[in-house]
Each structure stands twice: as C-alpha cells, then as structure tokens.
Image (tube, rainbow, N blue to C red):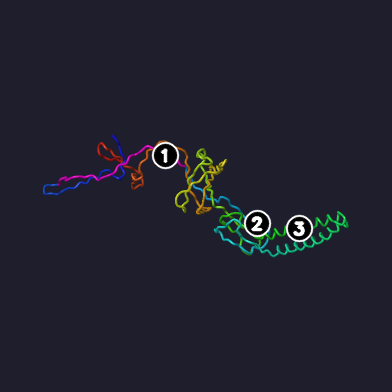
Amino acid sequence: MKNKLLITSLLTAMLVAGCTGKRGNNLTGAYSVPVIAGKATRINAGRKISVSGNIEGYKTVRIGFLVAGRINYIALNEGEFVKKDQLVASLDPTSYEIAKDLADIQVNQVQDEYDRLKIMHDNNSLSESDFARITYGLQQAKAQQRLHSKNLSDTRLYSPFSGVLLKKLCETGEITGAGMPLFVISDISKVKVSAFIPENELHNIKIGQEAKVTVSSVSGSLKGTIVEVGSAADIASRSFSVRIELDNPHLLVRPGMIAEISVNAGNAEDIIAVPAQAVMHDYSNLSYVFVADTVNNRAFR
C-alpha cells in the first residue's frame, strides 16, 4: 500500500442527505470533495545555528582636539554622515594666533641678526662660537614658529575617515582640554555583528565561514563572513564570542541594531519533508497532516 500526503486539509468529505417521505428516511447519496495529493520525500537537510547579535561599526574612534580651548563651532549633529577630512568642530583660535604672530616676529628678528653676523663670520670678523650661538638661536626660533603654527592648525578638528557621527559629547561654548574625546565617529561602509555561540556548537564555527544576517529594518537577508572566534568562553554564559563582517554599501545597517544570525552547522540525519501547504493546525495549534491510503481510498490523520 502506497501512501501519499494530502495538500488539502481533508481527503474526503461525505455529505449524507435524507429525504423524508411518508414511509421514513431514505439515504439518497454521497459524494467526495476533490483533493490534491503531494508526495513526502526523504532529504538530508542542513542544520542551522541561530543566535542574535549586535551591529557595530567596522571602525569606531573617539576624536578630540590636541590643544585646549573654548569650542566655538560644531559642524555636525548625531546621526549625520561625515566625509574624510571634513571639518567637525573648531576652537576659538585667538590666543593661538597671537602666539603664532609672536613666533613669526621672533624668527624675523633672529634671522636679521643671523644675516648680519654671517657676513662678519665670512670675513673672519666673528668667532666660531658666536656664530654657532646665533645659528642655534635661529633654529630654535624656527622650531617655536612651527610649534605655534601647528597649535593654531590644531584648533580645527577634522574627521579621520568617512562615516557617521554616533555621539557628540560637547556643546558650543564649552572649555575642553587637550586630548579629551568629544566625538565618536564610526565607519559603516562595512559593519560587524557581535554574537555569542553556545559552547557545544563551537566546533561547528570556523573563521571564513559564511553566515546569513537578518535585520528587521532591512528587507531580505545579508551575507556575512565570520572573521573572529573567541578563544576563551564567557565565565557567566559559557559561550564564545563571534564576529561576523558584512558589506553595507547603502548604509542601511547602523550600529546598535539587533541582527539575527544563521550559520550552517553541518548536515543533519535524513528527514521526511512535506509541502508546507499540507501542514494543518488544530485548535491547540498542534501541527498535523492527512496521509492518503490509495488502496482503500481513505485518509487518516
């Protein structure tokens, strides 16, 4: 006897109609509802590991000024995109401009004295020690000039790469110190997904392995690659950290989003697969199918 799986929820429905006459009830007939049967097949399905993870930027940095001062301009708000070398913020440059002007004056003065003494040195009218002293003095003045020029330039803060401004930790008018982190910028042309894999599944995870990443705010699934696998388990959860890298050309995936990750964990044993349309659900939400008995023309659940 060969059994087939029924696509519909019912193989046969019998309708019994009675006619009431003067002498009693008579069975007038029965008919079957047409159905379509589909075959159940035996397949070798791949087993999947499914976990949730957090989206991170491919590269994230905190930036701030190399000199102290009062912030007089901020070009961006959180969430805005920034290009490489774009101005992010600036300090009031007044004091640094004055220092640079003084350094320029000092260089000019020492340069004039150097030029005058060099003529004397060339005519053997100046000792070597005196000429060495003015030479070192000119070098020192020029070094101070370069330092003050750099300090003035450092009152303007530029983005080190293209990305998105994740955090702004300051406001216009605030006094900031040298080296204090004020902005967080992340490169999201690529993103990473950080997740944790159970200890018993670690042997199924390899660097370079493909992973399917799904983000609720992005239609469809994204293809990523495992780039990092933790070497030590988390003490509390006994799970291992995993990082998956994926391209983000349209910049739709942002840091902080939640992602669902699916990784192939090898082949499972043979299983019987049925068409999805054949699976029914009862009032308790339990799944079932009808199986066709083609010999006796019956269906059983």
Give the residues in magenta. Answer: 25-48
Q: As drawn, is 31 to the left or to the right of 107?
A: left
Tell me the crowding category of disc 2: few under 14, some 14 to 19, or many 20 or more residues within 10 angstroms, Cα based.
some
- State the SS at label 2: loop
Q: Residue at x 62, y 55 (%)?
A: 63
Dot 1 falls on a residue whose secondary structure is strand
On the image, the x and y values in percent for residue 13 come to 25, 45
Residue 45 bears which disc, if any? 1
- The quadrant the N terminus occupies is top left
Closer to the eye: label 1 or 3: 3
Residue named by callout 2: 180
- Is residue 265 in the magenta section? no
Give the distance between the C-alpha atoms of the residues marked 3 and 2, in whole angstroms. 29 Å
Give the side of residue 180 with respect to residue 2, left or right: right
Which of the pair 234/164 is nearer the observer? Answer: 164
The amino acid type of the residue labelled 2 equals Met
Earlier in the chain: of badge 1 and badge 2, it is 1
Q: Mark 3: which secondary structure?
A: helix
Q: Please name the amino acid that badge 1 sits on.
A: Ala
Give how far across and how far down residue 37 sits, in percent: 30, 42
Q: CA distance from mark 1 to mark 2?
A: 54 Å
What is the number of the mark on residue 142? 3
